[in-house]
Amino acid sequence: MLQLAQRVGRAKPSAIMVIAEKAKQLKATGRDIISFSIGVPNFLPGEHVYAAAREALSHDSGQYGSNRGAEALLDAFLRHIEALGFSGYGRLNLSIGIGAKHVLYNLAEALLDEGDEICFAAPYWTTYRDIADIVGAKVNVLHCGSQQNYKLTPAQLDAALARKPKVFLFNNPSNPTGMVYTGAEIAVLAEVLVRHPDTWVITDDIYHSMVFDGIGYHNFVHARPELRERVIFVDSVSKTYGMPGWRVGLVAGPESVAKAVTTLNSNHITSLPEVITAAAMAAFSGPQDIPQAKCAEFAGKRDIVMAALNAIPGVICPRPQGAFYAFPDISVAFGKRHGDTRIDSDVDFCAALLETKGVACVPGSAFGEPRALRISYTCPTAQLAPGLERIQQFFAELT
Ligand SMILES: Cc1ncc(COP(=O)(O)O)c(C=O)c1O
C-alpha cells in the first residue's frame, strides 16, 4: 500500500479550528452562538492600506518578486523595528514569509534537524508544538502554571538551557495567556541566555503593539544587545494592523538565519505578491492610530473579562496585560456535573459550555495546560458581557 511521509502522521489539525468549526455548525442550525474561540483581531486596516493596494494594482508588473522581500518593504520594516528599539539591522538581517506562522515553520526547517531539542514554555501557542513535531524535533515543555502567572522563571530557563537545546522559543505577549514580561523580567531572563551561548532564541513577539498598563514591550536584545547574534525576532501584520488574511510575516535576526529563510522561500513561495507587499508597507509606514486605538479598546475589554472571571468562586485568572486573551484556570469545575454531564476535563467543560450556553472557548489542553481554557475577547462589545454572563451562569449551575 502507498504510504504518506511519516511527518504527515505527526501533523495534527489545529484544535482551535475544531472548536471554531463546531461553533460555526451550531450557528448554521440557528443557535445563538458567542465565539470567544479564534484569535482574530476583528478589525480592518486603515483606508491608506487599501489605497496602497489599489495603487499597486494599477502598476502591477506581473512578475515574481524577491525571495527575501521587496527592498521597499524591508526598509519599511527596518524603520518599524527601529521604533520598537531594534537598531543596527540592515536588509540582510531580514526575510519574509506568508504570515508569522510560515516564518516560524521556515525557522524550524532552518534551525532544527530531526532529533534536535527545542524548548518553550507552556501554555504555548498550539502551532509551536505541531511545527516541532512535523520537523521531528524533541520538545522540552517548560510548565508555567497559573501559580507563577504563566511566566517562565529564570531558574526554569537556566535548567532547560543547561541541556543545550538547539532552539529556545519565546512568546511575549503570550497567546494564549495574554501575559507580558516586564522590562525587569526580560533583563533577568536575558542574563540567563547570555550564560548559555549554544542555543538559538526565537522571540515570537507579534502582539508587541498590544501591551496594556504602561508596562511596554521588551525584548532580550534591548536588555543585552550582544544577544543579537542569536536572537531571531518574528513579527507580522496580522494582529497589529488587523490584517490576518493578508498573510505577511517578517523576521529580523542574524544574517545567516535570514539567508536560510530566504533560501527556503526560493524553494516554495518564491515571493510575496506585489499588492500584498504594498499593503504591508503602507501598514508599517502609515498612521499608527488604529493599532493604538485598538490597544486601548482591548485593555478596556480585558477589564470587563477580568471583572467577570474574578466574580466566579474558585476560578483563578492571572491578569493579562497584552494581546487579547484571558486564560482562566477552571479546574474548580472538575468532578462536578452540569445537568447530566460530568465535567472531568477542560475538553468536557468547553463542550458542555458550547452545547448548553452557546459560548465557544478553546480548551487549555490545546495549549499544553489542561486546567484552563482560552477566552479570545475581540468579539463585538455587545456580545462580550452576555457571553461572560453565560459562563458565570454555567458555573453557578454546576453541582
Ligand atoms: C503567538 C502567535 N504567533 C504567530 C501567529 C501567526 O500569525 P500569522 O497570522 O502572522 O501567521 C499567531 C496567530 O494566531 C500567534 O498567536
Image (cartoon, rainbow, N blue to C red):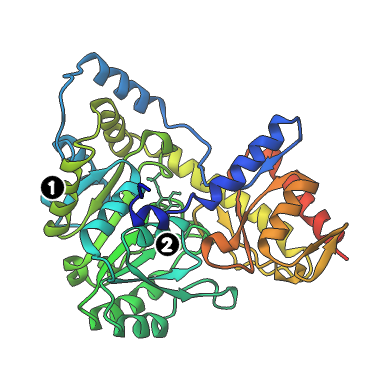
The front one of 253 and 104 is 104
Q: Residue at x 31, y 59 (%)?
A: 135
- Whether 391 is drawn above or below 55: the answer is below
Asked if residue 84 lies left or right of residue 197, the reply is right
The tag on residue 129 is 2
The tag on residue 91 is 1
Q: Residue at x 76, y 36 (%)?
A: 32
Can you tell which quarter of the image residue 38 is in? top right
- Whether 177 is drawn above or below 260: the answer is below
Q: Position of residue 223 (x, y in %)?
A: 28, 71
Closer to viewer: mark 2 or mark 1: 2
Q: Residue at x 33, y 21 (%)?
A: 51
Which class describes the residues within 10 Å of circle 2: few (<14), some (14-19), or many (20+)? Answer: many
Q: Amino acid at mark 2?
A: Arg
* Kind of element beneath mark 1: helix
Q: Position of residue 339 (x, y in %)?
A: 88, 57
The tag on residue 390 is none
